[in-house]
Image (spheres, grey):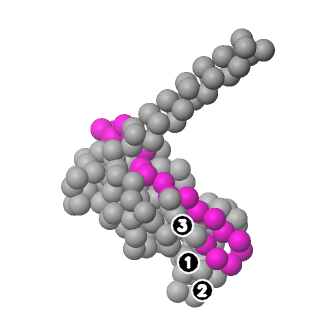
Amino acid sequence: MVRTLLIGLLLLSFSCKKKAQTAAANPVPSIPVTITLYPNDPLNFKVQAIGGWMYINGGINGIVLYRKSNEEFVAIERTSSYLPDNASAKVKVMSDNFTLKDSISDSRWRMFDGTVTKGPATSSLRLYGTTYDGNTLRILN
């Protein structure tokens, strides 16, 4: 019994350390974001179809909102994870509509999950949480 409890506590401490290291690994600061958007509104027609995207205000340097499926959206901070202190390195969507690029370092990331596809960046872009009920999209962290 004591041995099981000790093993459980040991595993818990390792999992907490890993989670803390992962959160700390992203060089882009975490700031409070609470945005409500209505994808079905004609003003948001760019994200009414799967694969659609649009820039929205919020975060540090803006957010790229991408419609991954009928029920799922991805909200990605536009601050480059390679040059987080350089506002000119703002991430932009490339003409293929699937790749994000910072024009200074030429680093690239996948739009559907923010992972690096080309360096020198080694960190993913900061993602914000999203919830969608079929009418209202909430972006938060």
Amino acid type of disc 3?
Answer: Ile
Query: Which mark is on residue 139?
Result: 3
Any part of residue 30 in sight: yes
Answer with left or right where residue 61 lies relative to residue 38: left
Q: Mark 1 Cα within 10 Å, few/some/many (few <14, many 20+)?
A: some
Q: Mark 2 Cα within 10 Å, few/some/many (few <14, many 20+)?
A: few
Which residue is the site of mark 1?
37
Image spot of residue 26 (x, y percent): 39, 43
Image spot of residue 128 (x, y percent): 50, 58
Q: Is residue 9 above or below residue 36?
A: above
Per the image, label 2 sits on a secondary structure element best described as loop
Any part of residue 98 in sight: no
Closest to the observer, 126 or 23 = 23
Q: Give the range drawn in magenta.
A: 116-137
Q: Which residue is drawn at 39% across and 74% down?
A: 57
- How many numbered marks have been drawn onto this rendered protein structure? 3
Amino acid type of disc 1?
Answer: Leu
Amino acid type of disc 2?
Answer: Asp
Query: Which mark is on residue 41?
Result: 2
Per the image, label 1 sits on a secondary structure element best described as strand
Res. 44 image quadrant:
bottom right
Q: How far apart are marks 2 and 1 (CA)?
A: 9 Å
Q: How far apart are marks 3 and 2 (CA)?
A: 16 Å
